[in-house]
Image (cartoon, rainbow, N blue to C red):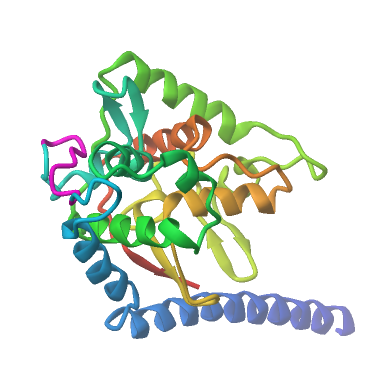
Amino acid sequence: MTKTLLLLGLSCMVASAAYAQKTAVESIEEYRAMLADGNPAELFEAKGEDLWKQQRGPKKATLEQCDLGKGPGVIKGAFVELPRYFADTKKVQDLESRLLTCMDTLQGFNPIEIAKTPFGKGEQVNMTAIATWISAESKGMKFKLSQAHSQEKVFYEVGKRLFFQRAGPHDFSCSTCHGQDKMRIRLQDLPNLTKNPGDGIGFAAWPAYRVSNGQMWGMQQRLNDCYRQQRFPYPGFASDATVALSVYLGVNSQGSASIAPALKR
């Protein structure tokens, strides 16, 4: 009898813990939903659109002739097709690296100096705002990254290898947190990014506003922080490594709808 009661008690404790964990996750989602209508990302969107049309840089020019892959000045739908190969640079570029090219060729900014600027300072702030606005113009559209060019295929394979590369003092990789189903850290669900995680999850949610630190993050900063958490050296801004990872994640998200700019904890 005593043994039966003990087993019953343990079963109740396990069930209660599982229920508490589930409701905690649900509470986080409810919190996000409550904030969604007033997502501070909207402020960055407005700033980004303004910056796109401003005459800036040594050449006193706008970015309105910037080609993001669908023709000069065409914004809608461009975000969900990036990264992609660009014939003029002969490189596969994501949104932020492509913006660097346009800020260089059209406005005369020094792309090397911008790439070396810390996140949250100088032109990096403007870069994030512009990327936020561009992503918002494709909100709800489905990702359809090209794999037609040989370089796009190479970048996918390189990104895949980087995703699974284990190194650093803790022998971590991207796949340590995002390589299997039903992973969680601090009550935060960790999506499996080796396959299509679904609408608005993982790659389909960045740029995003981080409520915890009151900052707007683009995909380059998100990847940079992943490397920090793995105790890896920081990758260079708009480096081939970060673009390759984005190709891998983006192709895996094929057909998922973008919710960027999203709201994150």
Q: How many marks?
A: 0
Residue 241: percent from left, percent from top: 52, 32
In the rendered image, the residue lying farthest to the top is 150
Q: Could you tell me if residue 260 is visible in this image?
A: no
Residue 16: percent from left, percent from top: 65, 82
From the viewer's perspective, is residue 40 above or below residue 191? Answer: below
> Considering depth in this image, is 64 or 259 the residue closer to the camera?
64
The N terminus - image quarter: bottom right
> Considering depth in this image, is 178 or 171 the residue closer to the camera?
171
From the viewer's perspective, is residue 165 above or below residue 142? Answer: above
Prevalent SS, magenta region? loop
* Residue drawn at x 74%, y 35% as measured from the top left: 167
- Please tell me in which quadrant of the rendered image residue 150 appears: top left
* Residue drawn at x 36%, y 55% as measured from the top left: 127
Residue 197: percent from left, percent from top: 40, 49
From the viewer's perspective, is residue 158 above or below residue 81? Answer: above
Would residue 122 be found to the left or right of residue 44 on screen?
right
Would residue 10 be found to the left or right of residue 12 on screen?
right
From the viewer's perspective, is residue 43 above or below residue 121? Answer: below
* Residue drawn at x 88%, y 84% as measured from the top left: 2
* Residue drawn at x 23%, y 61% as measured from the top left: 136
Would residue 1 be found to the left or right of residue 177 on screen?
right
> Considering depth in this image, is 107 or 148 the residue closer to the camera?
107
Residue 230: percent from left, percent from top: 70, 48
Region rendered in magenta: 62-71
In the rendered image, the residue lying farthest to the front is 58
59 falls in the magenta region = no
Q: Could you tell me if residue 16 is visible in this image?
A: yes
